[in-house]
Image: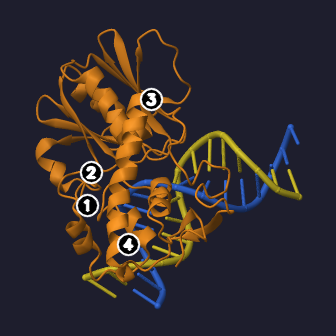
Chain colours: A orange, B yellow, C blue
DNA sequence: AATGGCCTCCGGACGC
DNA sequence: TGCGTCCGGAGGCCAT
């Protein structure tokens, strides 16, 4: 499930492959993937444009094009952009193809939750989804005091806060569990009751877990081991060896260690 | 106002 | 083998 580290990895892949390239042809195989346009007008508006830059904002990918146009994409559950040679066989879940020279960028998405829109540069700041995104957790602005301000007077569990894209952008269910395990915080812990050391641990682990996963994924691809301690170790706590608890918190399946993460 | 719960999209995994 | 159920990112809706 693509979260900040995965989306950042895709952004880097697209940046390498696309910046400076001209889009020669666009082929929409699954029309509902494009929400803003009919397939033909989407293809027509993209054709001939040059990719100026690629950035990530939360879990969104922003592909800036010549003519002050931006392709805004969200991978949701199973989306991915692959960069392949033109003659490479088509993956059965390919939804959109962007052809540039000898290579193609293909949007592949088994469950079809992913989507993309073509947005004018001037409308980016009001675009639904982007408009309300919170702070980038790996930016220099995300300091301990900023986190403290963010959580000030806020009710709800620490997990529900981590999942809120309008507070901190880019954390999903899997990394939320990992951050809380690393920070030794119970997922259902009320966020306004965190002590100063707990808040410091939370801040530190948000940055550490996301940065480390981004580095490993970008360097070694999705086959990396040792990326997540809680979700990939057979249901036992890597710290104390006890059986992990599986509960629903903030409407999401949550793994945690009842011994190391006490309320 | 802010929070939480539930529904929707889709298809793979899993249980009976 | 086949069928029902669950899950999830985010927006929308409704209840509290």
Tell me the element at label 1: loop
Residues behind callouts 1 and 3 on a single chain: yes
Front tag of 4 and 1 = 4
Residue under label 2:
A138
- Earlier sequence position, callout 4 versus callout 3: 4
Q: Is residue A37 left or right of residue B10?
A: left
Pointers 4 and 2 in contact (CB under 8 A)? no
Residues behind callouts 2 and 1 on a single chain: yes
Residue drawn 41% across the image and 63% down it: A163
Tell me the element at label 3: helix
Front tag of 4 and 2 = 4
**Label 4, label 3: how many angstroms apart (C-alpha)?**
32 Å
Against A78, is A245 above or below?
Answer: below
Residue drawn 46% across the image and 63% down it: A180
Pointers 1 and 3 in contact (CB under 8 A)? no
Q: Where residue A168 appears, x then y in whole percent?
A: 30, 61
Against A176, is A200 above or below?
Answer: below
Quarter holding residue A61: top left
Residue under label 3:
A220
Residue under label 1:
A134
**Label 1, label 3: how many angstroms apart (C-alpha)?**
29 Å
Residue under label 4:
A198
Q: Nearer the viewer, residue A252 or A231?
A: A231
Q: Where residue C16 appears, x then y in whole percent?
A: 46, 91
- Earlier sequence position, callout 4 versus callout 1: 1
Q: Chain of mark 2?
A: A
Residues behind callouts 2 and 3 on a single chain: yes
Q: Residues within 10 Å of mark 2 (few under 14, many from 20)?
A: some
Q: Nearer the viewer, residue A229 or A214?
A: A229
Pointers 4 and 1 in contact (CB under 8 A)? no
């Amino acid at each position: 499930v693509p979260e900040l580290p995965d989306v950042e990895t895709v952004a880097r892949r697209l940046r390498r492959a696309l910046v400076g390239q001209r889009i020669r042809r666009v082929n929409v195989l699954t029309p509902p993937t494009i929400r803003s346009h009919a397939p033909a007008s989407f293809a027509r508006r993209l054709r001939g444009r040059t990719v100026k830059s690629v950035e990530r904002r939360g879990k969104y990918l922003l592909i800036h094009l010549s003519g002050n146009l931006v392709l805004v994409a969200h991978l949701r559950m199973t989306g991915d952009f692959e960069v392949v040679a033109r003659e490479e066989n088509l993956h059965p879940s390919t939804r959109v193809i962007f052809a540039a020279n000898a290579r193609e960028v293909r949007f592949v998405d088994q469950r079809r939750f992913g989507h993309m829109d073509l947005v004018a540069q001037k409308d980016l700041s009001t675009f639904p989804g982007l408009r309300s995104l919170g702070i980038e957790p790996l930016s220099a602005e995300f300091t301990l005091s900023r986190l403290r301000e963010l959580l000030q007077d806020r009710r709800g569990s620490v997990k529900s806060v981590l999942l809120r894209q309008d507070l901190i952008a880019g954390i999903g269910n899997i990394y939320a569990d990992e951050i809380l395990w690393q920070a030794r915080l119970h997922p259902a812990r009320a966020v306004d009751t965190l002590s100063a050391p707990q808040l410091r641990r939370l801040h530190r682990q948000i940055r550490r877990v996301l940065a480390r996963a981004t580095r490993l994924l970008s360097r070694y691809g999705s086959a990396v081991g040792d990326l997540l301690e809680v979700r990939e170790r057979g249901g036992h706590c890597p710290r104390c060896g006890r059986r992990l608890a599986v509960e629903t918190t903030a409407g999401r399946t949550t793994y945690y260690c009842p011994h190391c993460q006490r309320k």
